[in-house]
Amino acid sequence: MVKLFVVAVLCFISLTTMGQKRTELQSSIARGKAVFENTCLACHQADASGVPNLAPPLIKTSFVLGDKTKLINIILNGLKDVEIDGERYDNPMPAFDYLTDNEVADVLTYVRNNFNNKAGGVKADEVAIVRKSKKKE
Amino acid sequence: MKKLSYVLFGITAAAFSAFTYQPKEEGIKLPSGFSAQVFASEVGEARHLTVTPQGNVYVKLAKLNNGSGIVLLQDADKNGKSEKRSSFGTYTGTGMALSGNYLYASSDEEVFRYALDANGMVADPAHPERIVTGLINRRQHASKSITLDNKGNIYVNIGAYANACQEKDRTKGSPGRMPCPILDSAGGIWQFNAAKLNQTYGDGKRYATGLRNVVGLDWNKQNDQLFVMQHGRDQLFQLYPELFDAKQSAELPAETMYAIKPGDNCGWPYAYYDQLQKKKILAPEYGGDGKKSGGENAIDPAVAFPGHMAPNGLLFYTGHLFPERYRNGAFIAFHGSWNRAPEPQKGYFVAFVPFKDGKPSGEWEIFADNFAGTQNIQSPGQAQHRPCGLAEGPDGALYVSDDVKGTIYKITYRGK
């Protein structure tokens, strides 16, 4: 009986933490949507399909689904003359280093969980570490 | 401001409704009496094109197709559809033009020419003459469009490798560089000798400056003058949200047609043309606020169109097939916008401006529409076709290239 009770309590605790995690992810995605609309949409477009030959799509590309550090660096430093999945894009992307760690984390979390993308979220601490190492350079 | 734009919208809408549009083959909508045929499809990323007196259609490609950058399309049985196709040229690019017995083509750094035989065929496709070399290519606005006069000169667009000559390109808060160093080697039209080999900057002349990027350009034979279509600057709202809202930024600045005299300055990057206030405005990167006038040394446009529609082709129509009002008028291929988001996109059509004695004589109108295959385009990726190049055939037909699916349209007139 006691055993059963302990199991039930443990189950309850783990479900609550999972729930909290989901809420955290959902609220990061919601905040990220606002950052995307203000900062990214003009070039990458509302459906993230980009502009052929000028601005890359953000739909299932190896960059969007890939390494988080590389992605954080693109937002903080901009991007120029880089081939993405065999295509070249002629318009340079400026640095968006005026965005806060939270905003960078939220917008990347949003993009990686939208537009048919499914990849892990990005946390503000991860952005802070990349930003710090950028300053040392 | 708002009132003015409503009035303008009303006038434009009234001008459009004067025509009865009927869907034609491939969904292209044209004024009544005109029809469009698919002359060729899937030729590659088709940019500019030209047609020889024999009816041979040469198309420049922005990407190699089966290893070639130029496609020749022939229609021996004259049924309006090309049945024979061949290709040559190992470089990509945009420019394609015809002058005398020579075919001219450009990469993003060089201009070449090929001698044509009596049948309008390239005599030696593997060995073109290199006319111009060493032109700057920094990817942004890299295409080198070309046209020729009848005095042995070729005009080459060298686009500015920036949006607004900021210290940091396209970066919020970054000021404009003074003077803009890009203008020394780009941001204008350069004139070269059409027959001399291996020319570079020192051999040419900067014929016009202050042009951010020109893709469509043509020589007007009626008044012997160069006309160009400029792609106006991007991102007024994204860079200056305190001065412009998203709706203003979608309309501004104008896409502009200029009648060029040697040495003309068209104002970029210091000023842009506002088609609603009908004046040149000081660019915000150089202290402007969206209202202050600017560009005192710059010329005014001959025609101003709504913003961001990307005029990629310009052709003065000299044929006799179309009704008289089209003769000597200008056709403009609008590739279609991206920088109107979050507002709906615009363009993706061929426009017409009537001309008299080498000057615009009426309002612009949409001539051929529905290349995108859908209304309310939110992003350019949704467009099935995007008009890019224009050419006139010996029979007076108008050819339009599409660089999405590589469709070449042939537009003819059969009367009412």
Image (cartoon, rainbow, N blue to C red):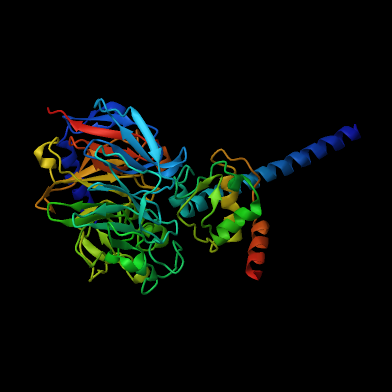
Query: Residue B77's image quarter?
Result: top left
x, y percentage for residue A13?
78, 42
x, y percentage for residue B238?
42, 58
Q: Is residue B307 left or right of residue B149?
A: right
Q: Which residue is at 21% across, 57% downward?
A: B226
Query: Residue B370's image quarter?
Result: top left
Q: Nearer the viewer, residue A110 or B215?
A: B215
Residue occupying the far right of the picture: A2
Q: Nearer the viewer, residue A28 or B207?
A: B207
Q: Nearer the viewer, residue B100 or B348?
A: B100
Q: How many marks?
A: 0
Residue occupying the far bottom of the picture: B178
x, y percentage for residue A74?
57, 56
Q: Nearer the viewer, residue B330 or A28?
A: B330
Q: Is residue A107 left or right of residue B209?
A: right
State the quadrant of the N terminus of chain B.
bottom left
Q: Is residue B375 visible?
A: no
With respect to residue B66, does B234 lie above or below? below
With respect to residue B296, does B100 lie above or below? above
Q: Is residue B214 visible?
A: yes
State the quadrant of the C terminus of chain B.
top left
Q: Is residue A123 left or right of residue B196?
A: right
x, y percentage for residue B276?
23, 56
Q: Which residue is at 40% across, 35% downward?
A: B405
